[in-house]
Image: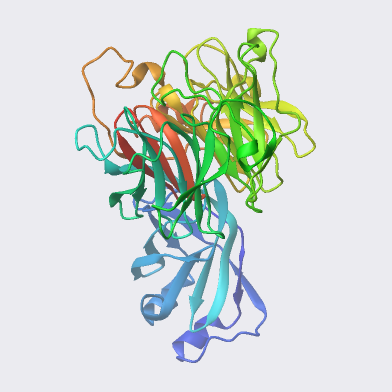
Amino acid sequence: MKKQMFVWFSALLFAFSSCERIPGNQPPKDINITITDIVGKPVEDVHAGMLIKLVSPEFTELNKQGLIRQEGKIFFDKQEAKIKEAKGDYVLLTLPILNYIELTRIDLSLLVRNTRWQLCVACLLYRPTVTGVVLTGGPEDGTFNLPAEMTLDAAGNIYVIDQRTGHDLIKKVTPAGVASNFAGMADEFGRLVGIAIDNTRGLLYVADATSDQVKAINLASPSSITILAGSGTAGNADGTGTAASFRFGANLVSDFGTSEVGQGMTIDASGNLYVGEAYTETISFASQLRKITPAGVVTLVPGSRIEPMSQEQVAMSAGVSIDAGNNIHYVSGSSGFYQGITKITSAGISSRLAGRTSFEGLNDGTGNLAQFSYPKAITSYGANFYVADGTNGALRRVSSTGTVITLAGVGHFATAAYCACPFVGPVSGSYVMPSLLAPADAYETLAAAIRMNQAGGVAVRSAGLIYVADYGYRCIWKITIG
């Protein structure tokens, strides 16, 4: 495929044939370059690991001198590609993994002897590859019982709530997938329904629905557990420390009939916690969010209280997140109720970002065109939100404008838990993100290459590294994009 004319220096061939240093201040010379696949078919979009061929008459003398193969480097944006062959008028190379999570137009450049030429500008569309593998755990290995909400420390270690029959545990998983018990081995916890970490203070926080308290765990000495806030009796009183009270929902992550209601925890950059809870026993499905300062001062989050007058208004939090602008987002929903994401701005204005009142199902789209199924957890990173979409067994990515795509998973009626079919275990897989001309449901189809079961927690290390807790397959998934 013919590309734009590219800038080169004049007298180039002379410079190389005489083995002189490439001139850096000569008038430019335009050339044509062709980019094809290995069999010579022109390409416009590419992905990591793909073999491509760059063809130009200008390469002939460079290759005759052996300069591209011996001293040359070709870059896709800022990432160097591996040159496999440089002969005649072409260069054959392998496209490297690029640090992009969206379809992105990329540049090509050539570096020889510390002199760089731009080969093309935005001439190729890079399509990232999504890969999902089981990091640790599995249906039968006993590492986890019901892995649920989770969080990350500064070193990338994962802290996972593992719900059990009596007393829940917190398990620590290293980036290499080594799992161990971290806290709760002496039955210090009841039902844990929220978790967050303050790396600055070295504290891990949990919401304990059995005692209706928020507890702080010393990361350096996890047997040191203190009560940050909560009297130990269910209620909705504001106050400081044990003068305050909470009404957390105590449902298991696996409760299908009721989902999680009044749960979830997140933390802002200042160390303030935000938790979801039920509000009062006198109004069915009433809910709200509370803010807890590092000093244990508990107050209502403005705009978060819902006293529903209809089923459509019900939105009891299952998971909570806060973005860099201090806007809170939480997921809620069960069959026949609103299933999706609610946004509360820092000014206390509430709106629905994505999702709709629906039964079980999976559908990508924007706003109320998107469909979730018992979403369990949400976290934010950059401009996007990531949702552990419960019985859909899916990881969903949601933009700040409410556009939802499925990154991994098969959808409610195809999961091992609800497909009414012979048991199918976890399936690791990968796919290349669909092109710009792909149909709207392309992600839903492709994401099924990564077969999860029931998604209960999500944590994001970077835009290209996401972890998902799967309480159906009792494992932690590692999802990469790039």
* Extreme residue in the top direction: 310
What is the x, y in percent for residue 390? 44, 26
Camera-side residue: 81 or 385? 385
Residue at image position (61%, 48%) is 382
Residue 45 visible in this rendered orientation of the protein = no
Q: How many marks?
A: 0
Q: Is residue 108 left or right of residue 408?
A: right
Residue at image position (50%, 12%) is 335
Residue at image position (70%, 16%) is 307
Quadrant position of residue 281: top right
Is 448 located above or below residue 239 in the figure? above
Camera-side residue: 122 or 48? 48
Is 233 located above or below residue 37 in the figure? above
Camera-side residue: 424 or 245? 245
What is the x, y in percent for residue 220? 42, 60
What is the x, y in percent for residue 279? 64, 21
Is 368 located above or below residue 106 in the figure? above
Q: Which color scheme is applied?
A: rainbow
Q: Is residue 365 left or right of residue 147?
A: right
What is the x, y in percent for residue 91? 39, 66
Is 174 located above or below residue 446 in the figure? below
